[in-house]
Image (tube, rainbow, N blue to C red):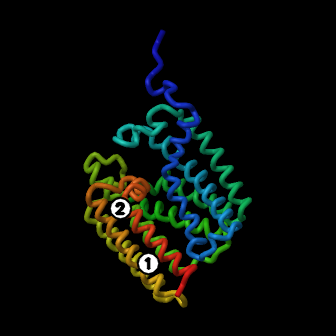
């Protein structure tokens, strides 16, 4: 009797394979859906919290649908990558047909779920899918544009929280979010370029140089710090709390730069969740920001 190929042996139950293919670790990015109600000080309101959580779930479904489609499209390249070759589709644990079917279901349910929460959220979900489709089909191969599109995805996550909860998003909120998004995406590209070098399989990555990406990192982090500082000192109330929150933000950005210089950053969500200094600085910033929102003085 012929043996079953190792890649197709049922070592894991189907749902675990599907869950892995949906990249649950990436869902940490969708926490941005809570950013707008958090900044507005409305997250303690049950209805607002429920709507923000709904936006989070919608984003998880939509983003997982795009991950599945991307993995199907990149299956050949992923099999040559030291990390990505372990993804379920590249490893042969999940067929391309099943992956595309699951992606379709997640996309439809995500759009309908978003529309049920708020009409604008449903439209935003469609816009997110269109954005990621343009990235997958074309812009991913264009240097600079690939960073811009992924950064726009981060911004849309934050906007989704505002749309779902009907909270006004100020220009400062948008500027800081956009700059931090560019910073994280450029840091990821820098880490990938350093790790893979001349063996890089991503076409756009081959067109970058470490120096170019370091310039983008410096400019984006500087603009984020300046915009946040400008916002903090123009607050009509509780300026001291917001001013103090500038310190952990700048230190967080500096710490992140240090870590990618040491070779980290290929998986931003893992780096952020595993580094104690980043977690501590994030907690301190949150405490000071919440102090400005709820305590004042």
Q: Position of residue 43 (x, y in %)?
A: 62, 70
Q: Residue at x 36, y 74 (%)?
A: 250
Dot 1 crowding, Cα within 10 Å, few <14, some 14–19, many 20+: many
208 on left or right of 69: left
In this rendering, does residue 2 appear at all?
A: yes
Q: How far apart are labels 2 and 1 at the CA level?
A: 23 Å
| Quadrant in the picture for residue 247 | bottom left
Q: Position of residue 110 (x, y in %)?
A: 66, 53
259 on left or right of 70: left
**Residue beneath label 1, please?**
245
Q: Residue at x 47, y 31 (%)?
A: 92
285 on left or right of 125: left
* Marks 2, 1: nearer the viewer: 1
Q: Position of residue 84 (x, y in %)?
A: 40, 42
Looking at marks 2 and 1 on the same chain, the residue that comes earlier in the sequence is marked by 2
| Quadrant in the picture for residue 161 | bottom right
- In this rendering, is residue 98 above or below 289? above
Q: Residue furthest right?
A: 116
The foreground one among 249 and 58 is 249
Q: Residue furthest top?
A: 1
| Quadrant in the picture for residue 229 | bottom left
In the structure shown, which secondary structural element does the residue marked by tag 1 occupy?
loop
- In this rendering, is residue 238 above or below 86? below
In this rendering, does residue 216 appear at all?
A: no
Q: Position of residue 262 (x, y in %)?
A: 26, 57
Label ID, residue 187: 2
259 on left or right of 6: left
The foreground one among 106 and 279 is 279
- In this rendering, is residue 174 above or below 265? below
């Amino acid at each position: 009797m012929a043996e079953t190929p190792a890649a197709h042996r049922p070592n894991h139950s189907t749902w675990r394979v599907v869950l892995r293919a949906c990249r649950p670790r990436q869902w940490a990015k969708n926490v941005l859906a809570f950013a707008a109600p958090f900044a507005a000080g409305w997250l303690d309101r049950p209805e607002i919290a429920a709507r923000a959580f709904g936006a989070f779930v919608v984003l998880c479904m939509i983003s997982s649908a795009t991950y599945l489609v991307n993995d199907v499209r990149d299956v050949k390249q992923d099999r040559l990558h030291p990390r990505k070759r372990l993804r379920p589709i590249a490893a042969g644990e999940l067929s391309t047909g099943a992956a595309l079917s699951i992606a379709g279901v997640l996309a439809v349910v995500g759009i309908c779920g978003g529309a049920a929460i708020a009409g604008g959220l449903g439209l935003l979900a469609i816009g997110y899918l269109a954005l990621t489709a343009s990235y997958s089909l074309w812009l991913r191969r264009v240097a600079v544009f690939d960073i811009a599109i992924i950064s726009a995805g981060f911004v849309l996550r934050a906007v989704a929280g505002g749309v779902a909860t009907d909270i006004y998003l100020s220009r400062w909120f948008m500027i800081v979010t956009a700059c931090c998004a560019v910073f994280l995406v450029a840091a990821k590209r820098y880490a990938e370029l350093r790790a893979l070098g001349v063996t890089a399989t991503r076409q756009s990555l081959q067109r970058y140089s470490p120096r170019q990406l370091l310039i983008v990192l410096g400019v984006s982090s500087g603009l984020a710090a300046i915009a946040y500082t400008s916002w903090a000192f123009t607050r009509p109330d509780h300026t001291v709390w917001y001013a103090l929150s500038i310190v952990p933000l700048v230190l967080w950005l500096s710490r992140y730069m240090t870590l990618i210089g040491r070779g980290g950053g290929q998986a931003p969500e893992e780096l952020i969740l595993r580094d104690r200094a980043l977690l501590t600085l994030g907690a301190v910033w949150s405490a000071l920001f919440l102090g400005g929102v709820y305590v004042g003085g």
